[in-house]
Amino acid sequence: MLQINVLAALTGACAALMTWLFISMSEGIQSIFYGDSFIHNSLEGSGREWWIIFIPALGGLIAGIIIEYWSKDAKGAGVPIVMEAVAVKKARLSAKK
């Protein structure tokens, strides 16, 4: 029972560390694109409001191009296709020919 408690404590500590790291990295990336941390400051009046629309749209465009021209298996139902690839095909999606 002691081993389980120790493993649970280590898992919790690792999760807390990863959460802190994720938040720190998110704020760092936001600082690069927006100047200051977007979590704490508004973009209103900074002249960069359009980034809120532009960055996610650019990500969607890149993902769409990759799916259209690179991987035929990625088309379709989305997450279920990827889950099937992980479970059945050893996490491999075939390249588009």
Image (spheres, rainbow, N blue to C red):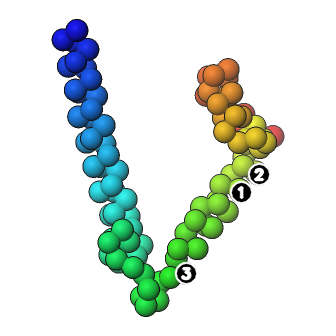
Q: Tag on residue 16?
A: none
In the figure, is residue 28 to the left or right of 86? left
Answer whether labels 3 and 1 touch (C-beta < 8 Å).
Answer: no
Query: Which comes before the other along the chain, label 3 or label 2?
Result: 3
**Whole-percent x and y of residue 13?**
23, 34
Q: Residues within 10 Å of mark 3 (few under 14, many from 20)?
A: few
Query: In what element is the residue under mark 1?
Result: helix
- Residue on which the image places disc 1: 65
In the figure, is residue 62 to the left or right of 13? right
- Residue on which the image places disc 3: 50
Marks 1/2: CA–CA distance = 5 Å
Answer whether labels 3 and 2 touch (C-beta < 8 Å).
Answer: no
In the figure, is residue 43 to the left or right of 93? left
Residue at the location (38% across, 64% down)? 29
Q: Nearer the viewer, mark 3 or mark 1?
A: 3
Query: In what element is the residue under mark 3?
Result: loop
Q: Residues within 10 Å of mark 2 (few under 14, many from 20)?
A: some
Note whether residue 96 is visible.
no
Answer whether labels 1 and 2 touch (C-beta < 8 Å).
Answer: yes
Q: Tag on residue 68?
A: 2
Query: In what element is the residue under mark 2?
Result: helix
The amino acid type of the residue labelled 3 equals Trp
The amino acid type of the residue labelled 1 equals Ile
Note whether residue 49 is visible.
yes
